[in-house]
């Protein structure tokens, strides 16, 4: 008899590329004999994955003027989703956690009352708790009641052990999968640059995604003041919306070092139909992050066969190897970043070699069928 699971996620397409994660996870599970029902919001389109049933029960929860109304609509969506999952015979409800609040507790208790198992994949809970210590007791209560916890790497597993006194064997490590099944690689770089009004002749480095303080854009901008002296045709494309600060924090650095002609700034949400072209247009993707638990942008860049330069944070180094499948610089050191960029562009064929190796790695070791098999085993342990 097939394991039947409910994948319940109200974020999906509202969270950047998170819906691709859900679709990949669903595909991998289905290919490993698991019956998957996905419950999500009404702005996430049906991906038409064979044997995947999708229910848009979280309706109208985004863009509400009053949090109370959004919370009420969320609860209605959860009640419909969890009860429906129970009625059709699901034994496990799998949730993705980016934070822990009273709504997460509501889902947990209702799932438990209906005698289904709870599985959590932990995304960025630790970072959010570090900003809001008052949630620690609630988080500990929620996580201790779960039947299975999953993190993406050893770094996050260790954080969970230290913060909540979990034993290592209580937390499974199942990595973030690639985006290869869901993207369209644009092979004509020049056409993509023309579409996005990016000069054809430049050496382009890309900072992609929501701009948060922990992502270290200021470090990349400071390094650009050094890079431009050695590589005068360098161009930094910043594609993503500022989240915690307005962009003036970064504009001051641009003005200070006279970087205007070396930057193209697209400080807004990037339309999905343009994402392919931003990655096609670039020579190198840079992730100057100061703190991270795992990175979808890393997987996305490698999926597009683009070389990636990352800060030498443990979560990145668990996935990639310096000068083989990616490049690394010393975290929060603009000079180190600059020297690495200069070295990369100064070495013939290095970018292409590393890009190909990175793509091969994630295609083989981080494909969704491999991940689905590991998830299926974890579900079996709960039976």
Image: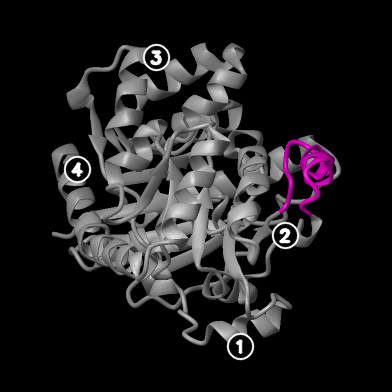
- Residue that label 4 marks: 378
3 or 2: mark nearer the eye: 2
- Position of residue 153 measured from the top left corner of the image (x, y, whole percent): 30, 37
Secondary structure at numbered mark 4? helix
Give residue 194's position: percent from left, percent from top.
68, 84
Dot placed on the residue nearer the N-terminal end, 1 or 2? 1
Q: How far apart are marks 4 and 3 (CA)?
A: 23 Å
Q: In the rendered view, would you say 236 is above or below 283?
A: above
Mark sitting earlier along the chain (1/4): 1
Specify the label residue 163 is tagged with: 3
Which of the 4 image quarters holds residue 160? Answer: top left
- Disc on res. 153: none
The residue identified by callout 2 is: 262
Question: From which residue to which does the magenta span run?
Answer: 241-259
Separation of residues labelled 3 and 2 (CA atoms): 43 Å
Q: Which is nearer the N-term, disc 4 or disc 2?
A: 2
Secondary structure at numbered mark 1: helix
């Amino acid at each position: 008899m097939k394991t039947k699971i409910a994948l319940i996620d109200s974020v999906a397409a509202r969270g950047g590329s998170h819906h691709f994660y859900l679709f990949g996870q669903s595909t991998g599970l289905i290919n490993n004999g698991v019956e998957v029902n996905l419950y999500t919001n009404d702005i996430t389109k049906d991906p038409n994955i064979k044997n995947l049933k999708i229910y848009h029960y979280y309706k109208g929860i985004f863009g509400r003027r009053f949090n109370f109304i959004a919370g009420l609509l969320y609860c209605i969506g959860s009640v419909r989703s969890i009860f429906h999952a129970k009625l059709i015979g699901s034994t496990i409800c799998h949730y993705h956690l980016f934070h822990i609040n009273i709504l997460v507790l509501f889902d947990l208790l209702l799932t438990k009352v209906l005698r289904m198992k709870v599985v959590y994949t932990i995304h960025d809970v630790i970072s959010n708790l570090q900003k809001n210590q008052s949630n620690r007791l609630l988080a500990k209560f929620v996580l201790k009641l779960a039947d299975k916890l999953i993190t993406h790497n050893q770094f996050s597993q260790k954080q969970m052990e230290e913060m909540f006194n979990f034993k290592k064997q209580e937390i499974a490590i199942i990595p973030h999968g690639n985006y290869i099944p869901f993207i369209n690689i644009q092979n004509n770089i020049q056409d993509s640059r023309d579409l996005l009004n990016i000069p054809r002749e430049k050496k382009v480095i890309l900072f992609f995604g929501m701009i948060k303080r922990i992502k270290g854009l200021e470090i990349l901008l400071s390094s650009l003041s050094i890079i431009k002296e050695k590589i005068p045709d360098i161009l930094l494309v910043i594609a993503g919306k500022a989240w915690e600060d307005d962009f003036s924090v970064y504009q001051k650095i641009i003005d200070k070092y006279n970087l205007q002609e070396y930057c193209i700034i697209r400080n807004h949400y990037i339309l999905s139909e343009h994402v392919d072209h931003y990655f096609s247009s670039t020579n190198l993707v840079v992730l100057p992050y100061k703190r991270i638990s795992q990175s979808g942008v890393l997987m996305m860049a490698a999926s597009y066969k683009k070389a990636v330069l990352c800060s030498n944070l443990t979560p990145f180094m668990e996935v990639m190897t310096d000068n083989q499948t990616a490049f690394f610089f010393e975290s929060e050191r603009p000079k180190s970043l600059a020297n690495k960029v200069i070295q990369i562009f100064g070495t013939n064929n290095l970018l292409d070699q590393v890009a190909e190796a990175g793509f091969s790695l994630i295609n083989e070791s981080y494909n969704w069928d491999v991940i689905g098999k590991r998830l299926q085993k974890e579900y079996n342990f709960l039976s």
